[in-house]
Amino acid sequence: MSSVPIDSNEHSPIDKLGEHVFDAVAEVGDIALFSASTLGWMFRKLPRWSTLVPNFYTIGVSSVPVVAITGTFIGMVLAVQAHSQFAAMGMETRLGSVINISLVKELGPVLAATMLAGRVGSSMAAELGTMRVTEQIDALSALGTNPVRYLVVPRFLACVMLIPLLTLMADFMGVIGGAVISTQVMGVDAFHYWLHSRRYVGSLDLFAGVFKSLFFGAAIALISCHRGFHSKAGAEGVGKAATEAFVFSFIAILFLDFCIGLVWNAVYYSIWPQNTGLL
Amino acid sequence: MNEGGTARGADRPIVALQGVSMRFRHQSVLRDINLTIPRGQTLCVIGESGCGKTVMLKLIIRLLKPTRGTVSFDGHDLAGLNEAELNRTRLRFGFLFQGAALFDSLTIFDNVAFGLREHSLYDEETLTKIVSDRIHEVGLPDGLEHKKPAELSGGQRKRVGLARALALDPEVMLYDEPTTGLDPIMTDVINELILQTQHTKKATGIVVTHEMKTVTKVADRVVMLYPLARLDPDESQIIYDGPAQGLEDHPDPRVRQFVRGEAGERLRELGQRR
């Protein structure tokens, strides 16, 4: 019997840097393949209704209260913060346009997506991470079922299809919250408040917000499921996957918001060059 | 390996590993494994923790891809199969995972029925009968079908896992430490169920275990793997391949040490490594 030393773990800083770069590139490639596989399965074989419905309920219906509450408060906070500035200029009645345009174009979609990433994204990563470490994902494969089709596609569909509705809910509650504080507490004239709102907030603004939310929903589902699928073993590994799911989703939401804003403005200016940008 | 003859020649190994190596980043786990498993044989794979037994099991059903070498099932290299073919091939395997790996969100009935439902193999009535039969075969009481896995004991979960694996009438059953964490009586129950599967279903069995009682009871053949970190570079990782009867008095002290469960110099070596 003889022994040889175990692989040495001593690496130079250059080795470690190279390893980190390699890992980062591999991670980007992996998430791209994961996304491609998810999209591919949507066109090949959709999951059963019995798999879809619980995901739609958990992701959509269960998120309504938290999105509605945060949406309302954002509208109310906007009214409180903006009122003194507008009152100083004697433009209180313009509050409606500022609050509502902010809500439907930016705060509603971003806030709904952030709440979805926090409430649903982390939970999806933790659930799938637990399935990974308890070999349930391997068990799916062993039973001849593709885990991406069975676990990721229903979550992806639920996020993408329901986030526009959650965004509209956040918009609506924010608009109501802002209007109640402005007209009932701050004493802004309701007629002019709504008049300016209607003049400056168009259906295209509303559409822009809802359109963006589709990308946010897709990013949340793909990032969260990917983190869950690649969770490390143990409670620490699953916890880390859940945290990463939220952090990476949030960064993706802001990045996509910026990119879509640029593209949307470019398209808008090319169609209506005389108008100001939308996003 | 006999590649000629009928499509499912009885003399052709049902599973064959040729020059299989597996490496995870900086750690080699398996090196140049050559192993053929004839149809109908029950093979026990033993060895210390971390020597690559579970990895070998996962390579056989292609839950992992080997770094080098080929894994064949019924004469077909698994690497050459597309996803649909691979999924169809996997249906010819049953896999009892170490922790049973039952789906938490599904009831026991739905767990056992999972493979049958996913592949739409039967109508609901036939499916219900098959699931009921399998649940009874593994000795689970009535009324358990509508419970969730979290409500079951470890032994019950293992038996549900076995029922789920058997539901698709597999040709090869893979058992990953089937008796780990169970009391001696439940250990023997599982051993009996492995024997029952071997005799009634005529399924080939590959059992990864540390439990020598399981080995002596169910094995037609035993293969012992040794951790690569403790081997010379030119030494074979399979240090024993033969019947269970030959283990106790084998000339290799490493085999005897494992079978007798003696720490020997290991504690001192582990201390030095720390």
Image (spheres, rainbow, N blue to C red):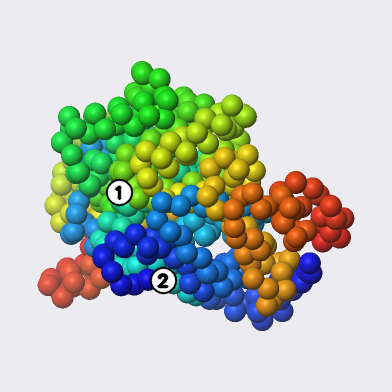
Which mark is drawn over residue A128? Answer: none
Query: Foreground: A173 or A166?
Result: A166
Tell which subunit mark 2 falls on. B
Which mark is drawn over residue A150? Answer: 1
Query: Foreground: A202 or B81?
Result: B81
Quarter occupied by residue A187: top left
Which mark is drawn over residue B1? Answer: 2
Residue at 75 percent across and 61 percent down: it is B252
Tell which subunit mark 1 falls on. A
Q: Is residue B176 left or right of residue B49?
A: left
- Indicate whether B4 appears above or below B266: below
Locate the N terminus of chain A and report the quarter of the image it occupies: bottom right
**Could one spot residue A97 in this view of the protein?**
no
Query: Foreground: B254 or A69?
Result: B254
- Indicate whether A24 appears above or below B260: below
Of the residues tagged 1 and 2, which is closer to the observer? 2
- Indicate whether A78 appears above or below A24: above
Image coords of residue A126 (percent x, y): 47, 44
Locate the C terminus of chain A and report the quarter of the image it occupies: bottom left
Q: Is residue A194 left or right of residue B108?
A: left
Q: CA distance from mark 1 to mark 2?
A: 37 Å
Badge 2 element: loop
Task: Identify which amino acid the numbered label 1 is placed on.
Answer: Tyr
